[in-house]
Amino acid sequence: MEARHGALEAVPITSYTIVVDDDGDKNDILRQKRVVEKQYIYDFAFGEDSTQEEVYSSTTRGLVRDVLLGYNATVFAYGATGAGKTHTMVGNQTNPGIMVRALNDLFNSIKGQQDVFQVKLSYLELYNENIRDLLNPSSGFLELREDHSGKNATVAGLTEIEASSTEEVMGLLLRGNRERTIEPTAANKTSSRSHALLSVTVTRIVGEERRLGKLYMLDLAGSERASNTKNRGKRLIEGAHINRSLLALGNVINALSYGSGGRYVNYRDSKLTRLLRQALSGNCRTVMVGHVSPASAHRDETRNTLLYAARASRITNKVEKNEIDVSFQVSQYRDIISDLRSEISRLKSKMVEDRPTSAELRSGRSTGTPVKQLREQIIATFREQMKLRRRLMDIDGHLMSLGVEAERQHQIISQWEARRTKLYTRSGRPGTTSSNAGDDFSEVSVHQAWSELSYIEREQERYVALRSATLKELDACRQTAVALENDLPEQLDSETEREMLSLLIRVHELEADKVALQGERLVESHELRRRGDMLQRFHRQQRLTDEIITRQRHLIEDGKIPLPSELQELYTLYQQEIHATTFSTDTAGIPYSVYDTLPPIKESEPLFKRNGERGYTGIALERLTNTADSEFGGRASTGGSTSTTEWDNSLPRLNTSSSSTHNQRPANTSTPPPVLFPPISKS
Ligand SMILES: Nc1ncnc2c1ncn2[C@@H]1O[C@H](COP(=O)(O)OP(=O)(O)OP(=O)(O)O)[C@@H](O)[C@H]1O
């Protein structure tokens, strides 16, 4: 680590806060006494005395446990050149870094287990936008390939080596590191000029089942300012590549930190971001270790790194959702049914074709399969087709259920992540370290959600494979049916046979109708479930909005801020909406208010319920509402209970008396006035 000199200091003041003490120009008399301090709060902050083991335990040990359970995880080091990234990630033989410690932990955990584990490693470097295999450098530059969705990138031809001990891994890493492009620069004698990615794939074999967990560990090349490094020629070009890819990474982190519905996330600007796409946005737990130098020479890089780390910590593990495309499913059902109908109509057309008479047949013109046998074969193939189609529908139905379930788990995880971020920013302590029983509970449920999700993903893979096998079978069956149909005109000779066949067709028509109805019902029920989920989410959002409006009203009232007329109008509209909803009823005549679509006046309930707890976020999410007399009952023109007469806000005061607003249910719950605000006096 570079010695500290100059004015800027980046100092961890607690185990999770870093303070940058930037007292600027000492010669500036006016500002001499003014210390400009900027505090950054992270999950953990490490000082110069922190050991490799401390860094590893706090950042990565938990990820190793997750990988063994079948999750994906990434840890990457980010920071200015010479700030200590390689030291943290790779380390040396006597004092190894995260990579070796993680694998050591992994092997130790596997040792005590009954299940069979398989651990495979690959190690690559990204140098000047070229990928090289560090375990097999002679293979030249490798190609980065993406699947059709563009979300999963793989490196074609990358060597994967199976390892079973820490010593073996040590050997492989040393071998790989020797191949890494390291050059002396003005800023660092052993500067890594490439990004190095160690991928560890752990397969856990439990009976028939295989669980796959991946751990990516990445040592990035350092960001550098050309003016600071005094690099020339080749070094300068390398630096430009490094900065370009780091800039792309920074942009991705930036965009992701805006959350869903935020900015467009462009992963395509560099191979680094394409490689890290899954780690940053997908089904993956990611840790960023930001490295800063306390030296003033690195002032800008330090600020940049601290800022990126702060943004990265805002990325709520935005697991990309498996959106359930119901219309796609509907069109699949339609395809199946139209296939079925066209087969029936083909069969029908054969019925009306001229056929030989019994006499002709008896005279020996026809030599095909006997009619009875043929009929049985046709019935059997139809039955088989129906069976396969039903299986297909079951598979599709199951895949849809899995999709809905996955979306639910994603929600649990996202909520947990969002709450964790809030806790973190409000209390200055990360939620994960809280000893609160409720947080432990939520930790457990989020772990369950991850575990569910990984199970769902495996199930989805299994069912997709089953689906394509069933489709193949169906195709073969259909061809057999066509071949049998072609035989028909030769064989049918009597009216009885025709009638039998037309009856058969009728049966199959009914069958097709049944399939159609079943398909539609299935799709509808899934759609209803999905909408139910969406409604719940909207309700949650609405409660939050109500809460925000209420609090803002408190601010307006307390601060005696005059209310702009447009806002007054919006309040009026809002109330009208609430009024309309209160008196609307559903098809059964039950008022919507019974469903609690709006926050009831006196009810006090936390937004996120937990075993006997109020709320997670530190925002007391009780509903700050009025007493029963507030809404259509009478306070309309009272103008509230404000004692200050000179303030003319035209909004009545909110009733802030805790006894009347908190933790009480109205006595008569059958007619709750589910309105947040008292009527605005002007209206
Ligand atoms: N915490 C530390 N304790 C002891 N030495 C350290 C520490 N951090 C870094 N160093 C030493 O500082 C020097 C530069 O560190 P390192 O090579 O890890 O930086 P880097 O961020 O990877 O740089 P680059 O981006 O140029 O590759 C190395 O000699 C390294 O051993």
Image (cartoon, rainbow, N blue to C red):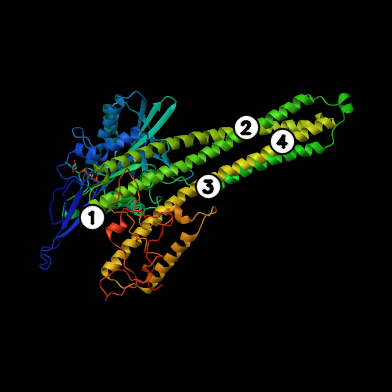
Q: In the image, which disc is placed on residue 387?
A: 2
Q: Which residue is mark 3?
A: 527
* Residues marked 2 and 3 touching at CB (< 8 Å): no
Q: What separation in Å lies between label 3 and label 1 (alpha carbons)?
A: 48 Å
Tell which quarter ligand 1 is in: top left
Dot placed on the residue nearer the N-terminal end, 4 or 1? 1
Percent across and percent down for residue 495 are: 84, 32
Lower sequence index among marks 4 and 3? 4
Q: Quadrant of the N terminus?
A: top left
Q: Give residue 390's position: percent from left, percent from top.
A: 60, 35
Task: Quarter of the image for the C terminus: give it.
Answer: bottom left
Mark 1 = which residue? 303
Give the residue type at disc 2: Lys
> How far apart in space, not on screen, are marks 4 and 3 (Cα)?
30 Å
Measure the C-alpha gap from mark 2 to mark 1: 65 Å
Q: Which residue is mark 4?
A: 507
